[in-house]
Amino acid sequence: MSETKKLMYVNRKAPYGTIYAWESLEVVLIGAAFEQDVSVAFVDDGVYQLCKDQDTTGLGIKNFSATYKALGDYDVNKLYIEKESLEARGLTLDDLMPLVYEDEDDDWAEKDSIKVVSSQEMAELFEQSDVLFNF
Amino acid sequence: MGIEVNGKVLETDEEGYLANLNEWEPEVATAMAKDEDVELTDSHWEVINFLREYYEEYQIAPAVRVLTKAIGKKLGKEKGNSKYLYELFPYGPGKQACKYAGLPKPTGCV
């Protein structure tokens, strides 16, 4: 299996309350070892996964939001957020964690991993992917 | 299963990883290493401490590839390669060093 596939992981659910967000993140990190072309999408309540200053003390479960910051180290640096989902929840890019990666081909310059796209653009990204994983 | 450290028995899972991350103290690493006939040197501690800091920041134990790259950046290029890390931790820098550091098995490690 030498050909590279375009994998798209789609996150639609809030980070806590179900296990989907954490499971998705683990699958993304594990899958990163296979050197595929990985993108991660955040739509609907999934946009909450990237919110700043998450605090789970009241829930008694692990706050794994810091782990998204490791995605850059795993060469996962195409994170697409749907603009309409952000707006419907009264959120802007400033409410999200700044996630960056170092571009190997550009003298390790630090670049933003997060891209806000319209639902139309998101549909095109889905269309171009070989495999979609829904969480 | 468990491991005895400073007169207390700390719970571990079936593979010897510490059940509760917060119970870790340096003697845990020393005791685990002794069980595997490893004498911990400053070079071992550098990696163990690095892993604990990485976990503190990202809440995961890094995959070997990520660990190697990050070590090279932090501790110098001559240490950022798998040969160096495997010499220190022959059972695998991810598995063995994470165990000594009291972390769970690295994400992506089977």
Image: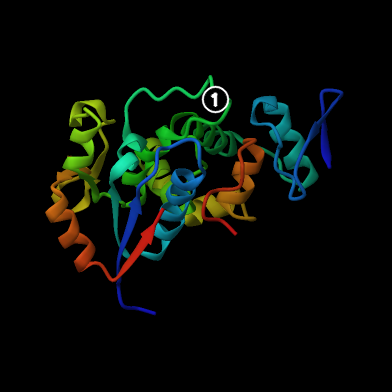
Q: Is any part of residue A100 visible from this angle?
A: yes
Q: Is residue A100 left or right of residue B23?
A: left
Give residue A133's position: percent from left, percent from top.
38, 61
Which residue appears farthest toward the top when viewing the image?
Answer: A58
Q: Is residue A134 above or below residue A59?
A: below
Q: Is residue B107 left or right of residue A42?
A: right
Q: Chain of mark 1?
A: A
Task: Please tell me in which quadrant of the rendered image residue A8 appears.
Answer: bottom left
Q: Residues within 10 Å of mark 1 (few under 14, many from 20)?
A: few
Report the residue at 41% width, 33% height from top. Answer: A65
Q: Point out the image quarter for the C terminus of chain B.
A: bottom right
- For mark 1, what is the residue? A59
At numbered mark 1, what does the secondary structure look like: helix, strand or loop? Answer: loop
Give residue A87's position: percent from left, percent from top.
18, 34
Q: Is residue B86 left or right of residue A5?
A: right
Report the residue at 32% width, 26% height from top. Answer: A52
Report the residue at 19% width, 67% height from top. Answer: A128
Tell me the kind of residue under disc 1. Leu
Give residue B24's position: percent from left, percent from top.
68, 28
Which residue appears farthest toward the right when viewing the image?
Answer: B7
